[in-house]
Each structure stands twice: as C-alpha cells, then as structure tokens.
C-alpha cells in the first residue's frame, strides 16, 4: 500500500496509520536524506523478524535506531554529559552515533544484547521527524537496497511506486513524498563507546566537531 504525503507537512492521520502498522508488527518505508529506509518497531518481535527476513541478514546484524529527540535516544542508549553537549550542536544531522545500549533495547534486539551497542540517528528530514513524534517511540531501520526489491540493476533510481510494486507483499505501507532529492552520501559514523568520540566512517556529516 502506498500513501502520498507532503514532506514538509505530512497528514497526521496518515502518520498515525503508519504508527499503528508498526505496533501491529508491520513494516513501513519512507525516504531519509540519504536513502529510502524500511522501519520496524523494535519492541514487536514480529516486526523485527520481518525486517531481518527482508534484509536477508541474521539477527546478530545491527539496524540503526531512528530518534526524534534526545529523550528518545536516552531511553535506549547511555549518553553522558560530554556527548550530550556535543550532539546538541550537530543534531539533527547526517550522522550515526554508536553508544552503549540500555536494557530497554537489548531486551528485544539480539545484536545489541550481544555487543551492548546501539547505533542512533537523528535524521534532519521533516517527514521522518514528524512520524517519530507521532509514533512516540524509536524505530529500527535498514536502508532499502535493489537486492531487497529483487532488482538486478543498481542504477535504477528507487521511488515509491517501484518499491510498492516490487515489495508490496512484504512492506505494509510506503510513505511517498513524490519528487525527492537525496544528499548522495552516507552518514558519518561516530563511536562514543570508548568515552571519546571516534570517527569510524567519514560521510556527509562534518567531522571537525570530533577533533
């Protein structure tokens, strides 16, 4: 199923429908600034299992947790004062931050339970942030690949109708804002688990904050 939304002002009724789908163990899909993502409710085993099957990976692989606020992030990860002060300067932004995971998330995700880590994102995209505010909880996400859609050519641009046609039996709802421009780069990954920030991958987010 596909729902067309206005990116800067999505309809709350549509987002509430998407939220209920997640709570019922379904999957939804929408674009962030870097790519299309498929998301699930990390606290619903059926949804988590569906996302792993769609991604074709085992349950020791991490998915990224999307957050709308620091309150959400602190529900699932340990963010100390120095990290909090730094993040306040740069989020929302093009970053993925790795923190020590809290029991709330390790209880449900084997990957976090195994290494006690969780990857956090604060996407600077109104559609995503508005949905998370409506949903009221973090979600786990995986970027959508051509392989997941059964498409052989990586060069084919992904768009809502193509995703719905190719994977509509596995993804319950596609939120499509119409024409959409991605930033053309991955997020910068910063690891805080040792206490000091360490840049693991340079991407779209500036790294001068961590030097």
Image (cartoon, rainbow, N blue to C red):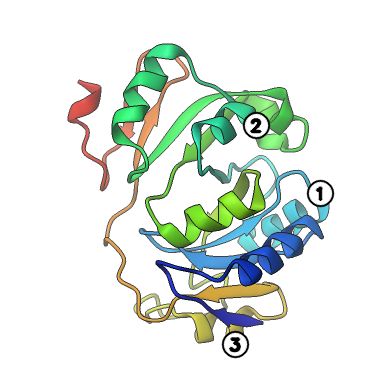
Residue 184 horizontal side relative to residue 43, left or right: left
Above or below, 101 relative to 160: above
Q: What element carries label 1?
A: helix
**Residue 81's quadrant in the figure?**
top left
Count residues near mark 3 (Cα–Cα under 10 Å), then give few for <14, some for 14-19, many for 20+. few
Q: In which quarter of the image is the N terminus?
A: bottom right
Give x and y (percent) for residue 3: 59, 80
Count residues near mark 1 (Cα–Cα under 10 Å), then give few for <14, some for 14-19, many for 20+. some
**Residue 173's quadrant in the figure?**
bottom right
For residue 45, the mark is 1
Give x and y (percent) for residue 174: 59, 74
| Residue annotated with mark 3 | 165
Residues tagged 2 and 3 counted as in contact (Cβ below 8 A): no
Count residues near mark 2 (Cα–Cα under 10 Å), then give few for <14, some for 14-19, many for 20+. many
Give x and y (percent) for residue 27: 69, 64
Above or below, 117 relative to 53: above
For residue 112, the mark is 2
């Amino acid at each position: 199923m596909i729902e067309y939304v206005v990116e800067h002002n999505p309809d709350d009724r549509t987002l509430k429908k998407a939220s209920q789908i997640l709570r019922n163990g379904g999957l939804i899909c929408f674009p962030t600034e870097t790519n299309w993502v498929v998301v699930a409710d990390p606290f619903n085993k059926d949804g988590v299992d569906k996302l792993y099957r769609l991604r074709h990976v085992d349950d020791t692989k991490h998915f990224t947790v999307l957050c709308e606020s620091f309150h959400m992030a602190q529900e699932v990860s340990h963010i100390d004062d120095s990290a909090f002060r730094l993040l306040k300067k740069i989020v929302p932004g093009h970053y993925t931050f790795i923190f020590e995971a809290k029991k709330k998330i390790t209880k449900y995700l084997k990957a976090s339970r195994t290494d006690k880590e969780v990857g956090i994102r604060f996407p600077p995209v109104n559609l995503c942030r508005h949905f998370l505010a409506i949903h009221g909880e973090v979600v786990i996400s995986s970027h959508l690949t051509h392989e997941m859609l059964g498409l052989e050519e990586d060069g084919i641009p992904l768009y809502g109708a193509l995703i719905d046609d190719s994977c509509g039996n596995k993804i319950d709802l596609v939120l499509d804002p119409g024409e959409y421009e991605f930033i053309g780069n991955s997020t910068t990954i910063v690891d805080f688990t040792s206490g000091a920030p360490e840049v693991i991958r340079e991407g779209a987010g500036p790294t001068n904050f961590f030097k």
